[in-house]
Image (cartoon, rainbow, N blue to C red):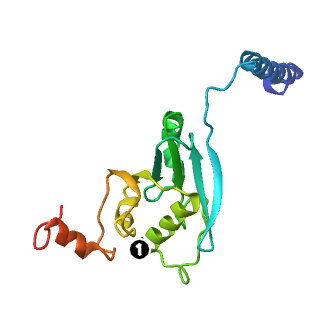
Amino acid sequence: MPFFRSSRWTRWLQVSRMALVLSAMLASFQLLAQTQGKKLPMEHPTFYRTTQIDGLSIFYREAGPKDAPTLLLLHGLPSSSRMFEPLFARLSDQYHLVAPDYPGFGHSDWPDPKIFAYTFDHYAEIMNHFTEALGLSRYTLYMQDYGGPWVFAWPWPIRTGSRLSSSRTLWRTTKVWGELENAAGLLGRSRC
């Protein structure tokens, strides 16, 4: 009779399974005992919220003291506000952080493209209403690629202390592209 079909093999498998279960239980009890009584290091947790803007549910993450300088973090494509989790962990003790998901991204509503204009101008309008709804009167914008183009379509003046951009691109789909070209003296020149 082969060993793998014997009663000794079956018994060995049962004992091995039991040892594995006991090891896992002991490890979890040890971890639990080590963390009991210890306060979590995060002083300013991240809150996950939604607000109604122009009939859409806009999801956003928020952390940090409300009286601290505010950073409005605008995600890239094809991402969501989740891309800023490492910043939330590192900066929430010094800054008030707000990171929305645009319509059609992350946990915000995904309206039908037949009835919703997915344009930079429309995103600018919605994000402007978003900041008004949250009562953000002064903030620093941090834009990640996709946030760059529509922020230039944002109604001026923007209530910013400054604008920070990572890999921003200017797309010609914003209604202010021509004004930007004229202001920057780019007409008839290469656009790198």
- Residue 180, position as x, y percentages in the image: 23, 69
Q: For the N terminus, give its image quadrant.
A: top right
Q: Is residue 155 left or right of residue 16?
A: left
105 or 180: nearer the eye? Answer: 180
Q: Is residue 146 visible?
A: no
Q: Is residue 162 left or right of residue 131?
A: left
- Residue 182, position as x, y percentages in the image: 17, 72
Q: Give the farthest residue toward the bottom.
A: 114
- Residue drawn at the location 61% of the way across and 30% of the way down: 42
- Residue drawn at the location 24% of the way across and 74% of the way down: 179
- Residue 73, position as x, y percentages in the image: 46, 51
Check disc 1 and report the residue beneath it.
121
In which image quadrant can residue 45 be found?
top right
Q: Give the farthest residue toward the left.
A: 188
In which image quadrant can residue 13 be found?
top right
Label 1 Cα crowd, 10 Å radius (few <14 / some 14-19 / many 20+): many
Q: Is residue 88 visible?
A: yes
Q: Give the answer, above or below, for where 165 lies relative to 87.
A: below
- Residue drawn at the location 69% of the way across and 23% of the way down: 39
- Residue drawn at the location 86% of the way across and 23% of the way down: 14
Q: Give the answer, above or below, for where 176 lies relative to 29.
A: below
The total of numbered circles placed on residues is 1
Q: Is residue 64 left or right of residue 166?
A: right
Q: For the C terminus, give its image quadrant.
A: bottom left
Q: Give the answer, above or below, for where 118 lies relative to 25.
A: below
